[in-house]
């Protein structure tokens, strides 16, 4: 029974897989051109799904972009020319790997800077806790010991 449920789960996963996003009518007859079109499609973001490439998406806009890519590849454009053409029409957002420039600096370098800053704060807090613990754990002075003895003796006498 357990094996059957695993098999059904696996089959449902395959059925929902984005690998079948490209319809049979979309594929180019020339295998080399189709491979180029697929490579280009994996570099372009679906503007509807946003976290998928146009090669993986079933959205109508992704289908239109795949057809446009195949049309440009078939016309003889290089991969760079096809990507530049779509990039000029849709902007940086259509690229799964946006270029590094002044507008995308925070996107590229923000997470590592934030991580370093967070680690620095953790180290500072840990260091302060150790210092605070060390000052509380210091031995008592002679006067403090005498005062403690006096207080403890009074408590015992009152019983």
Image (tube, rainbow, N blue to C red):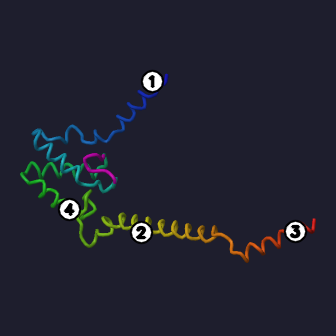
In reply to whether residue 77 is colored magenta, the answer given is no
Q: Main secondary structure of the magenta part?
A: loop
Q: Say whether marks 4 and 1 touch (CB < 8 Å).
A: no
Q: Residue at x 35, y 35 (%)?
A: 15
- Percent position (x, y) of residue 35? 15, 43
Q: Whole-Å distance between the Cαs marked 4 and 3?
A: 83 Å
Q: Whole-Å distance between the Cαs marked 1 and 3?
A: 75 Å
Secondary-structure class at tag 1: helix
In the displayed structure, does residue 141 sit left or right of residue 20? right
Q: Earlier in the sequence, mark 4 or mark 1?
A: 1
Q: Residue at x 48, y 70 (%)?
A: 124
Front disc: 3 or 2 = 3
- Packing grade of label 4 (10 A; few <14, some 14-19, many >=20) is some
Q: Whole-Å distance between the Cαs marked 2 and 1?
A: 49 Å
In the displayed structure, does residue 148 sit left or right of residue 15? right
Q: Which residues are magenta?
A: 51-57
- Percent position (x, y) of residue 114? 40, 67
Q: Provide the residue designation for mark 4.
A: 87
Q: Whole-Å distance between the Cαs marked 2 and 4?
A: 34 Å
């Amino acid at each position: 029974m357990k094996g059957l449920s695993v098999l059904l789960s696996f089959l449902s996963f395959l059925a929902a897989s984005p690998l079948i996003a490209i319809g049979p009518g979309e594929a180019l007859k020339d295998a080399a051109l189709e491979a180029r079109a697929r490579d280009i499609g994996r570099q372009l973001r679906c503007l509807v799904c946003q976290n998928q490439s146009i090669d993986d998406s079933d959205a109508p806009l992704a289908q239109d972009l795949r057809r446009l890519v195949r049309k440009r590849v078939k016309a003889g454009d290089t991969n760079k020319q096809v990507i530049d053409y779509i990039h000029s029409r849709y902007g940086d957002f259509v690229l799964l790997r946006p270029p590094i420039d002044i507008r995308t600096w925070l996107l590229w370098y923000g997470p590592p800077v934030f991580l370093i800053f967070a680690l620095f704060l953790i180290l500072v807090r840990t260091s302060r806790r150790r210092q605070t613990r060390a000052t509380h754990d210091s031995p008592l002075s002679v006067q403090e010991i005498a005062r403690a003895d006096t207080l403890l003796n009074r408590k015992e006498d009152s019983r």
